Amino acid sequence: MADDFTFTSPKDDHLSREQYWVECWANSDMIHSYKILNLVEEGSTAFVRYVAKLQDGKRFINTEFFSIENGKIASVEVYFGRELS
């Protein structure tokens, strides 16, 4: 991740790298697995659509937009999808 990395979602507005680790990554142990459905790369950007499965078996679908600069992730924008049965 770039030193000036930012993370944005419907719940978060341009969190810094440090804020991301504290506020978002702390919940990563809730995730059991990810299944990538689509990955579209164009130059220094990429869209990833995936299904995430939680430890309790619930699943949801999201899309993330990545920007890369100098070989590091500069920003991530998350677009929440829906819960799956």
Image: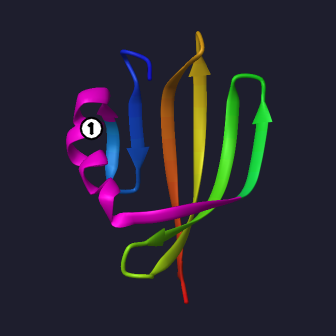
In this rendering, the count of numbered labels is 1
Q: Position of residue 3 (x, y in %)?
A: 36, 15
Asked which secondary structure carries label 1, the reply is helix
- Extreme bottom residue here? 85
The C terminus is located in which quarter? bottom right
Q: Magenta includes 22?
A: yes
Q: Is residue 36 left or right of residue 24?
A: right
At label 1, counting other C-alpha atoms closer than 10 Å, the crowd grade (few under 14, some 14-19, many 20 or more) is few
Q: Is residue 7 above or below residue 53?
A: above
Q: Position of residue 45 (x, y in %)?
A: 68, 30
Residue position marked by numbered label 1 in the rendering: 21
Q: Is residue 16 above or below residue 38?
A: above
Q: Magenta includes 42?
A: no
Q: Position of residue 23 (x, y in %)?
A: 22, 46
Residue at 31 percent of width and 28 percent of height: 17
The image quarter containing residue 44 is: top right
- Extreme top residue here? 70
Q: Is residue 58 above or below residue 22?
A: below
The N terminus is located in which quarter? top left
The image quarter containing residue 20 is: top left
Viewer-proximal residue, 45 or 35?
A: 35
Residue at 39 percent of width and 30 percent of height: 6
In this picture the colour scheme is rainbow
**From which residue to which does the magenta span run?**
15-36
Q: Amino acid at mark 1?
A: Trp
